[in-house]
Amino acid sequence: MQPNNPDDIYNNYSNIVYKYLLCLSHNETISEDLTQETFAVAFAKLHTFRYECKLSTWLCQIAKHLWFKQSKRINKEKNVSLEEIENQIFYDNDIDSIVVENEERRKFLNTIKTLEPNYKNVLYLKLIGDLSFIEISDVLNQTPNWARVTFYRAKQKLRKELENERENRL
């Protein structure tokens, strides 16, 4: 049986929800805000939880829904002025290294996106979210051993894809 006390639920699962949201948003502030919102929604709807899945899975589903809702809202409001872009460029002392680093990160993340969903999810949760295999298994409703094996296979596949990409550039 899983805990019903809101304090216990928050203490046991807030880190998992936060790391999951960090994987989705890549933004600590948004992840913190959405984690709080997730638990507010969860506590209001706790009476509807039927224990058909793990509590962590249910909480992550709420978090994912809130993230998608937030993303739609952000995309509608996204209007960056030319002045803001110019200011950022002028204040970045080492723009070349930032561009190279961002390009490498983009290539790496784009390569991850090409992998099958299980590989992609486990890599995001482990590498970006810094979740343990037990936490990953909770989020994805699998066993810790499945998470370990999938992570190993995903790393092998990712390494192969990146090597192929490097060879094609040469």
Image: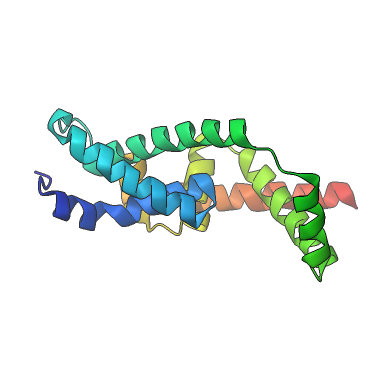
123 and 38: which one is in front? Answer: 38
User: Is 106 above or below relative to 66?
Assistant: below
Q: Position of residue 142 (x, y in %)?
A: 32, 41
In percent of width and height, residue 3 lies at 11, 48
Tell me where residue 40 sits by quadrant.
Answer: top left
Q: Does residue 65 appear to the left or right of 25 in the view shown?
A: left
Q: 99 and 109: which one is in front? A: 99
Identify the residue at image location x=10%, y=49%.
Answer: 5
Taking the spot 75% from the left edge, 61% from the top edge, the residue there is 101
Image location of residue 2, percent across then percent down: 12, 45
The reply to whether residue 147 is in sight is: no
Question: In the image, is residue 85 above or below residue 70?
Answer: below
Of residue 100 and residue 5, the one placed in the foreground of this image is 5
The colour scheme used to paint the residues is rainbow
User: Which residue does the image show at 79% across and 50% down from the upper left?
Assistant: 83
Q: Is residue 146 left or right of residue 94?
A: left
- Name the residue at 45% across, 38% down: 67
